Image (tube, helix red, strand yellow):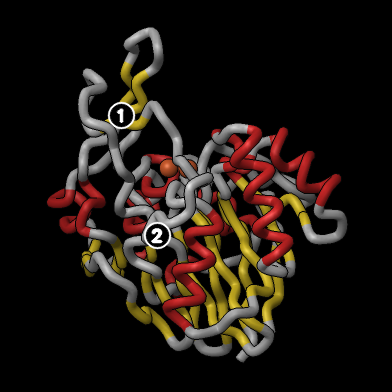
């Protein structure tokens, strides 16, 4: 079966004129006979960009959410107002309060910007699950990703309270896995669990070793130089085919991967469309 992944929301826009960027990520997965949305961006660009890219969001069978941050869930309202009743595949921790607390003590609320009852009222049919599951033919959600290696240490500054006392483990962070003929394709939201941990979870879940591509936010824009170097080494040794870096990959990590993983790295902006076999 063939699939197509098209980036609908990202921090940057590509070559399709009239598309808009915002801090966030969303991608549409299409196959013969169906489609599914992965994340919804921050809320200002999803419907606009989908229209501009000639994609009808009313046709998707549901939405898979990577985690509860606003930049992946903020488009839910506009989406549901357009598309009506839809399945929303998410982790039960989706509505946990979340904050970024700066060194100065300033706290920014970064959780999902809507309440559960409100979203249900406009058509959300939540389907919560902590573990892995198949949500469409050959398309899986990883569920909880075990944090196994020593170098993917995550992002400090994320908390479940505005006073910065309770660190947010981001246990709900999950990725989407497409099992295609030539190997796995992973769609990452923010990938707070770490790209390498996530690839290992996807391999374990599917029993497929070959990873033909990862697409989305790698969170390498928020990590140390040591973590970036260790991640690039692991990507090489795991023989990951292509890295379509978006969103929280950040300019610095993207530039390094562009230079050091020559031919493998591609920036994935709004409008980037990848055919998968
Ligand atoms: Fe994000
Ligand atoms: Fe996030």
| Residue positioned 22% across, 66% down in the render | 128
Judge the density around disc 1: few (<14), some (14-19), many (≥20) Cα neighbours within 10 Å.
Answer: many
State the mark number for residue 99.
1
Judged left or right of residue 27, residue 18 is right
Label tally: 2
State the mark number for residue 174.
2
Label 1, label 2: how many angstroms apart (C-alpha)? 19 Å
Instruction: Locate residue 117, reporting x and y percent.
Output: 13, 51
Quarter in which the C terminus is drawn: bottom right
> Ligand 2: does it lie within 8 Å of the C-beta at label 2?
no
Judge the density around disc 2: few (<14), some (14-19), many (≥20) Cα neighbours within 10 Å.
Answer: many
| Residue positioned 64% across, 47% down in the render | 230
Quarter in which the N terminus is drawn: bottom right
| Residue positioned 68% across, 43% down in the render | 229
| Residue positioned 39% across, 71% down in the render | 141
Q: Which mark is first along the chain, 2 or 1?
A: 1
């Amino acid at each position: 079966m063939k699939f197509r992944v098209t980036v609908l929301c990202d921090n940057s826009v590509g070559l399709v004129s009239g598309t808009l960027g915002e801090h966030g990520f969303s991608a549409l997965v299409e196959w013969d006979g169906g489609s599914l949305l992965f994340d919804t961006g921050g809320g200002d660009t999803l419907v606009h960009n989908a229209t501009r890219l000639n994609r009808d969001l009313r046709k998707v069978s549901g939405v898979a959410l990577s985690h509860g941050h606003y930049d992946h869930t903020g488009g839910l309202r506009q989406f549901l107002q357009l598309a009506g009743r839809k399945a929303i595949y998410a982790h039960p921790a989706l509505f946990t309060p979340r904050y970024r607390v700066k060194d100065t003590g300033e706290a920014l609320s970064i959780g999902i910007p809507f309440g559960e009852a409100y979203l249900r009222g406009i058509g959300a049919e939540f389907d919560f699950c902590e573990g892995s599951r198949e949500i469409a033919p050959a398309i899986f959600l990883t569920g909880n990703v075990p944090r196994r290696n020593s170098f993917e240490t995550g992002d400090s500054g994320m908390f479940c309270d505005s006073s910065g006392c309770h660190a947010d483990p981001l246990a709900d962070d999950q990725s989407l896995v497409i099992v295609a003929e030539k190997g796995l394709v992973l769609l990452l939201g923010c990938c707070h669990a770490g790209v390498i941990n996530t690839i290992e979870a996807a391999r374990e879940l599917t029993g497929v070793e070959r990873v033909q591509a990862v697409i989305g936010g790698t969170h390498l824009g928020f990590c140390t130089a040591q973590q970036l170097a260790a991640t690039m080494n692991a990507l090489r040794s795991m023989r990951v085919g292509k890295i379509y870096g978006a969103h929280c990959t950040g300019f610095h990590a993207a530039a390094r991967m562009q230079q050091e993983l020559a031919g493998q790295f591609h920036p994935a902006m709004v409008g980037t469309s990848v055919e998968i076999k």
